[in-house]
Amino acid sequence: MDKIQLIEENRIKHGYSVISRNVSMKGYKKFNNKHKKENIIFKLESNLAIYKKVGTISNLLKNLRLLAKKDDEFSRLYSKYIQCIVDKHRNCLIIDDLIEIRDSLCDYSTFMTDIYEINDDQYDFDDHKISFTWNDIEVLFESENLLSKFLENRFEVNDFRFNTLLIGKIQEFNKNFQKLELILQEDDLKYSQAVFLFRNLNETTANLQKFLNENYYTSDFVSETYNDLQLILKSLKHFKKEINLPENLGSLFEKYRNQLQNLKIDNETMRQVLIDELEGRITFKSFKRMPLGPVFYDLAYDFVQFPKEDDISKEKMNLLDMNKK
């Protein structure tokens, strides 16, 4: 296995990375000390963990001395990476050196987190990133490799930078949309399956929209998709014979119109719908002037407003009669 990749995985698993289950440089140092006789990378990472913990560069200089004795690709690359950290500490960082390291390590999130920390907003790396437009949202990938992973739904969120989180939420939308599209292709489509997946997609879209709003980013596609999903879910909820397929999502699901309009409603779903309907019928929605003392039905009728029968309830009761036949 590539040494850089091995370091990346160990960092994520054992406390170095910001997304580790338990971020602890002490724990990461302990892990590397346990394995330092197996490979030089564990000794190097142990020294780096000490620097991260106490802030002195003496252990980083030890790394540079260890690597100076070697002349392989990994040693040269890791040495340049450590040298940039040392130069940052000494206030003599050369940006071109950092850019070179960035372009070599752009596939590895933990190294990129360190590089952004070293850079400290001195240089804008956007020109070195890969721009990709998803509907009306532009996202930036650190490398072509990460873009390819995204297109295959294999992108991993390993840091908390805006673009990384945005890509992760878009990927979640894509996955849920593809699941829904797959189930809509089935001839024997069940109501409960359709509702479950539409709700999942709706929740994912809501989370994406919330994230964009919190970061002052707008997307007409996301807003329209969320509104369209609300209409579709409302149609499904009321068992309408004609499912509303709004313009935005309608074009996406037009070929599945027949499946959506011939959903099979299972007995358990129908039972729950009728229970909900009955609860609505026997629950007071508003009060006029409730008397303090006990009342009989004729008197209570003057004070309590019961819900009137509407088109939706009629349709549900007709549906029940059809199921009995």
Image: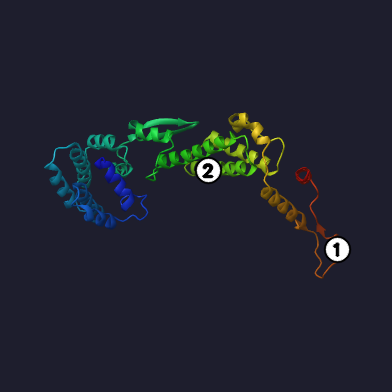
Looking at the rendered structure, which numbered label has been put on residue 204? 2
Q: Is residue 262 visible?
A: yes
Q: Nearer the viewer, residue 239 or 158?
A: 239
Horizontally, is 296 left or right of 259 in the view? Answer: right
C-beta proximity under 8 Å, tags 2 and 1: no
Please identify the quadrant where the C terminus is shown: top right
Residue sitting farthest toward the right: 298
Task: Measure how far apart labels 2 and 1 are at the Cα level.
Answer: 48 Å
Horizontally, is 321 left or right of 12 in the view? Answer: right
Q: Is residue 117 visible?
A: no
The amino acid type, in three-letter code, at marker 1 is Tyr
Horizontally, is 3 left or right of 233 in the view? Answer: left
In the rendered image, residue 119, in percent from the top left (x then y), is placed at 29, 41
275 vs 201: above or below: below
* SS state under label 1: helix
Q: Nearer the viewer, residue 311 or 114?
A: 311
Q: Residue placed at 69% from the left, 52% from the top?
A: 272
Q: Which quarter of the picture shows residue 239? A: top right
Please identify the quadrant where the N terminus is shown: top left
